[in-house]
Image: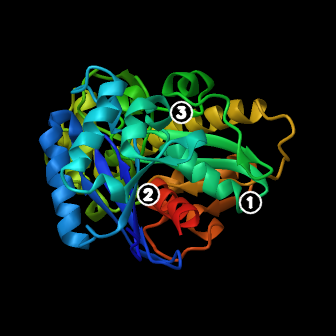
Amino acid sequence: MTTSCISGWDIGGAHIKVARCDSNGELLTVTQVACPLWLGIDQLERAIETLLSDLNNQGDRHAITMTGELVDIFANRQQGVSDILSCLKKYIAPQNTVVYAAELGLITPAHATQSWQQVASRNWQASASLVAQQESEGLFIDIGSTTCDIIPFSNGLEVPSGTTDFQRQTTRELLYTGAIRTPLIAISQAAPLNGTITSLAAELFATSADVWCLLGLLDPKTIQDSSADGQSWNNTFCATRIARLFGADFEQASLNEWQQVAQWFAEQQIHQITQAILQVISSQPSLAHDAPLIGAGVGHFIIKRCAQRLNRPYRDFANTISVSNINASDNAAAVAVALLAHRNLT
């Protein structure tokens, strides 16, 4: 069945992102909905229903990539891939669906279930592959709500040191730190307040979004995730959550002082990511000293700061692939799988 539009789906453990392009490969819509998949497969069903209703895209060709198979409702990643594809089958006809499988290309859902190793957590590869077709060399970096991908590319191809999450965590091409959901205790176990470095509570009291909202670099209106205590993302609540790490209350310091604490955590996270970038660069001795960092994800502003520290040019994912949709960079994998499908299916 031939249709005029293609919808690219990036199915994560916390969100689903969909990018829709027309027959000319022009992006029409890029959107995201929350999907806390760890709470149950019904969360995925609700998210799919919401997206199909909002986009009215049932008749499209659909290209799928995913990372949601890693959540702990599944016994293993193989089951996760199978169950996610089975859930999609309830809503989208398999004959209208292809699955991104890296070196295997775009394959049928049945084939994807059998070749799950090439499907599981390969969304970063779709994005890096698309960027590599537009830029001669560099690093593609995507900082999302939860993770940071750092992928070298050269001569039209992505050149990762590994492809599985385990391999990529070993090489730090996958770093579990993000702009929204990362517990602050994972960024630093101590922080300064009133001139003293204080050990912090090893509890999920505050996350990275509290830091970046307090610093005015993350718009609270764009956050679909719940905060650690379920309260809003305004400055007072963000500071209150950070104060709990110190065993303190918001009232024990001024807002300016809590923003200074937030700056501490911001510097620690930037340092972690910069160190990982340097490790990845060390595996690419031929990479030019002025090869750019191509940034994507809701945490792209962090990548800009890393580029400044490394004295490398920064370029935005959307500009690199020449698309104008303001949401494209924050949803790079969905955009990439839609455009790669357009190139291969039309």
Q: CA distance from mark 1 to mark 2?
A: 19 Å
Front position among marks 1 and 3: 1
Q: Quadrant of residue 243?
A: top left
Q: Earlier in the sequence, mark 1 or mark 3?
A: 1
Who's the residue at 69% across and 54% down the image? 132
Q: Quadrant of residue 39?
A: top left
Label annotation for residue 174: 3
Label 1 Cα neighbours within 10 Å, binned few <14 / some 14-19 / many ≥20: some
Count of number-bearing discs? 3
Q: Earlier in the sequence, mark 3 or mark 2?
A: 3
Q: Position of residue 93 (x, y in %)?
A: 27, 56
Who's the residue at 35% across and 59% down the image? 96
Q: Amino acid at mark 1?
A: Glu
Q: Specify whether 166 is left or right of 256.
A: right
Q: Specify whether 296 is left or right of 182.
A: right
Q: CA distance from mark 1 to mark 3?
A: 21 Å
Q: Amino acid at mark 2?
A: Ala
Q: Amino acid at mark 3?
A: Leu
Who's the residue at 61% across and 70% down the image? 319
Residue labelled with disc 2: 334
